[in-house]
Amino acid sequence: MPALANGKGGTSDRERSAGHLSGVTPEGSLYWDEGVFRAELEKLFYRNWLLVGRDEQVPRAGDYLTRQVGGENVIVLRDRRGTVRAFHNVCRHRGTRLVEAESGSGLRSIVCPYHAWTYGLDGRLTGAAHMDRVEGFRPEENGLFPVAVERWGGFLWVNLASDPTPIATELGPFFERFSRFHPEELRAGPRHTYEIRANWKLLVENYSECYHCAPIHPELNRITPYLSGENDAFFTEGEPRAKFAGGFQTFAKDYASMTVSGYTDRPPLRGMTGEDRKRIYYYVLFPNAFFSLHPDYLMVHRTWPVSPSQSVVENDFYFDPATMARPGFDPTDAVQIWDTINRQDWHACELAQLGTRSRVWHGGRYSQQERLVWDFDAFYLREMGFRRS
């Protein structure tokens, strides 16, 4: 995957002055232990803001999408007043899964397929046969379990915590950086979905460095050399600590985009300065999103943990709608090179997953090109309450 500056980019003066990176990587069991995985779901994926989709996926009342998050399933919909809402996709009666499809439209109500308890699109229980004489039963106390949902830049985010930290507190600084590019105006292009036999943390670590780019990404390294760029955001620095990290890489020669040729006839996205046009910005939004902003398109990866050794990644591309409406619009040059890079990364991550099970490996030393990997690992260990070696 992209690797971020230093990682993907060079070493900044601040990082040079920090000297070598102390400590070792997390031990192998953190990548395959079932108990650790369950704890990660509880402490990380059920308590942080997760990118689940786009506003344009639920444009009208009754439109919906569902999302599996570990052992939980969430339905996101637009109600009759035009408000986007989210609920646990479970009936209050016997715990039945309510909506089976991944997406759809035309919902007038949500009806349990088991005993026909019926809910409005606002989550209220509107019908429950033979419950009128049940002692102490109050319909107003038996609506759907709500899930916090927020919108920014055309994206939809949910948080399964009962009292979540406002999204502006955790991701506001990132939103401020990206708002000038008007992501809400972009529209979805192609999507690739990958099933990967590797732990979700290995995917984040891979995205966070370009130490590997010269050996396994010749296509990428030709266009943005692995020593280019700089990191400019860290999980472990700043107050309040925002939950994103990353930086940028710069184009070699006169290359203008990450495409098969390195060039493009697509115009720059709105808000791009001359400096921006020479860069690709890469950021991890903890815990499940990677934002990769190119001069002419936005690429987003969403990572979903399935088990300690299995993950699903959705890779979406977004373009300016005016550009998409031009005769002959064809995003293949961008999609194709990233499919190649992605598959190279996934294979490397799967090999790493296999190696972490060895009884002789107890962690390794970070290179000077893995500052953001160290940063992510330190942040992860702190969030989980683990001690660092």
Image (spheres, rainbow, N blue to C red):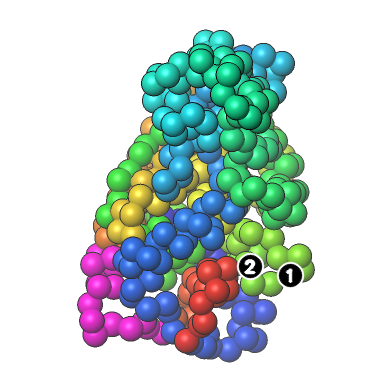
As for residue 97 lying within the magenta part, the answer is no
Residue 234 got which mark? Answer: 2
Residue type at mark 2: give it.
Phe
Secondary structure under tag 2 reads loop
As for residue 352 lying within the magenta part, the answer is yes
Q: Where, by quadrant of the figure, is residue 236 drawn?
A: bottom right
Residue 276 got which mark? Answer: none
Q: Residues within 10 Å of mark 1 (few under 14, many from 20)?
A: few
Name the spot of residue 229 as percent of width and height, x first: 57, 64
**Up/down of 124 relative to 283, above or below:** above
> In the rendered image, which residue does mark 1 sit on?
238
Residue type at mark 1: give it.
Gly
In this orientation, which residue lies closer to the viewer: 47 or 136?
A: 136
- Residue at 51% x, 43% y: name it: 300
Secondary structure under tag 1 reads loop
Name the spot of residue 341 as percent of width and height, x first: 35, 51
Question: Marks 1 and 2: in contact by CB < 8 Å?
Answer: yes
Identify the magenta region.
Answer: 351-365
